Image: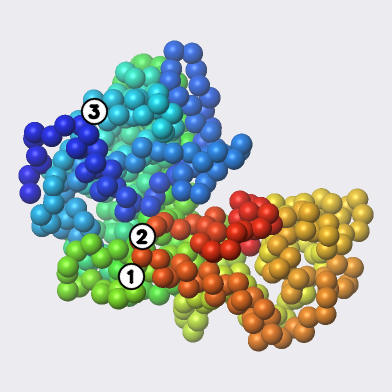
Amino acid sequence: MLIQQEMDLKEKLAILSDAARYDAACTSSGVERKGKPGQLGSTAFAGICHSFAADGRCISLLKILYTNQCVYDCRYCVNRRSNDVPRAAFTPDEICRLTMEFYRRNYIEGLFLSSGVLESPDRTMELMHRTVWKLRYECGFNGYIHVKAIPGADPVLIGQTGLLADRMSVNLELPTAEGLKSLAPSKDRARILGPMRQIQTGIAAMERGIVPRGEPLKGAVYPWRRQFVPAGQSTQMIVGATPENDYQMLTVAEALYRNYDLKRVFYSAFVRVNDDSLLPALPGGPPLLREHRLYQADWLLRFYGFTAGELLSESHPDFNIFLDPKCDWALRHLEMFPVEAQTADYGTLLRVPGIGVRSAKRIVAARRAGRLDFAALKRMGVVLKRAVYFLTCGGRMMYPVPMDQDFIAAQLLGEERRRAWDIGQKDSYRQLSMFDDGFLNPVPTAEDRVSAALGQM
């Protein structure tokens, strides 16, 4: 279907913001830039969708597509070429107007800009670059901007855009080349990984003081050309569209972190928006619980020192639906517990369920001044309702607990069963993250609120 020409800005916004909601790779975490005289906007270490600024604020982004017109016919995508849906496209001036007006009204603090492929990858990337250039140089917008790199586009265009954006992302879409060939035959794994490598190389070059290829307007001096994609890059994988198990998905994510220095891998539960024989039926709806477990495991990879091979294996390829990955791992390795809070090193403390990054650091710092007890651990943010089964203070547990897998699992499952059922039964699609409270009906306690905000595992 062709783009409708007679359409006002409000109608375009309705179509293109709705079309962008299936893209989960949206975050403003990882960069800080203060406001400057004569310019508008600023950005701080913050994010959207359960990421928080240093002062606790949740940052909102205007999340839109440049266009939902696309030359590709990916079977899982609502914007596929063969779908009969209303099509629209912004102009660079319209996106600038929307961004500035929304910012002035305090609705947003930045922009997330993605797009279908209009005419060709080069044409699409050129339009997106022109849009961001206008925002930076003509509108003086100094706020956060996240831009999608279009696979197959000219590396010069990607390099120019990287000098304007805070974060860039290239969606891997599906975890294996076989899945991509089956559901998105027009896309190629090498063309997706190429821009990832370019962005990685550009960030590394900028850190060495070398301006990456594609510097815009040579000879001009601009405040934001000092850095190339300072907030790093991310990607997204669809969960449940193809038959890969959790172990395969987590192994791919681990390889991306290791080989491409990604800041974040996002997981998006597959939503069946098209009637296609090659797509799974999903009688129970989108696999939201599976997505939730992958986010939890991803957190363990990035901040807790775990590897994919420790959490899962070929003989144990999928996560426990009733227990979070850290508790499940601990139950399968009871020979390593209980851990003594007074003497265990930082890395060992991180592996105790209920102890997060912050609380582990507090324990290490506090025990230098004196002996710890369970009351002190609770004040430090340790979630004792999980940690008591795996932790001792001064050689004693909080109360006698048999180190028996079945017994401990039964105690932990009381809470986790409610979480798992409620997440799995939700009718409407919602992105989940490490900071979800599990949608429990009972009012959360103060301890629950603290552990959720701090990501205590």
Residue 385 appears left or right of 153: right
State the CA–CA distance, disc 2 to disc 3.
29 Å
Front-most of residues 167 and 422: 422
Q: Where is 91 relative to 455, above or below?
A: above
Mark 3, residue position:
94
Label 3 secondary element: helix
Image disc number at residue 285: 1
User: Quadrant of residue 333 in the image?
Assistant: bottom right
Label 2 secondary element: loop
Question: x, y percentage for residue 365?
Answer: 82, 50
Which amino acid lies under the numbered mark 1 shown in the image of this protein?
Answer: Gly
Image disc number at residue 256: none
Quarter of the picture holding the C terminus: bottom right
Residue at the spot 50% in from the left edge and 21% down from the top edge: 35
Q: Nearer the viewer, mark 2 or mark 3?
A: 2
Question: x, y percentage for residue 249?
Answer: 42, 68
| Cβ atoms under marks 2 and 1 closer than 8 Å | no
State the CA–CA distance, disc 3 to disc 1.
36 Å
Outermost residue, top side: 38
Image disc number at residue 429: 2
For marks 3 and 1, the one nearer the N-term is 3
Front-most of residues 64 and 196: 64
Q: Where is 89 relative to 400, above or below?
A: above
User: Quadrant of residue 160 in the image?
Assistant: top left
| Cβ atoms under marks 3 and 1 closer than 8 Å | no
Which amino acid lies under the numbered mark 3 shown in the image of this protein?
Answer: Glu
Which amino acid lies under the numbered mark 2 shown in the image of this protein?
Answer: Tyr
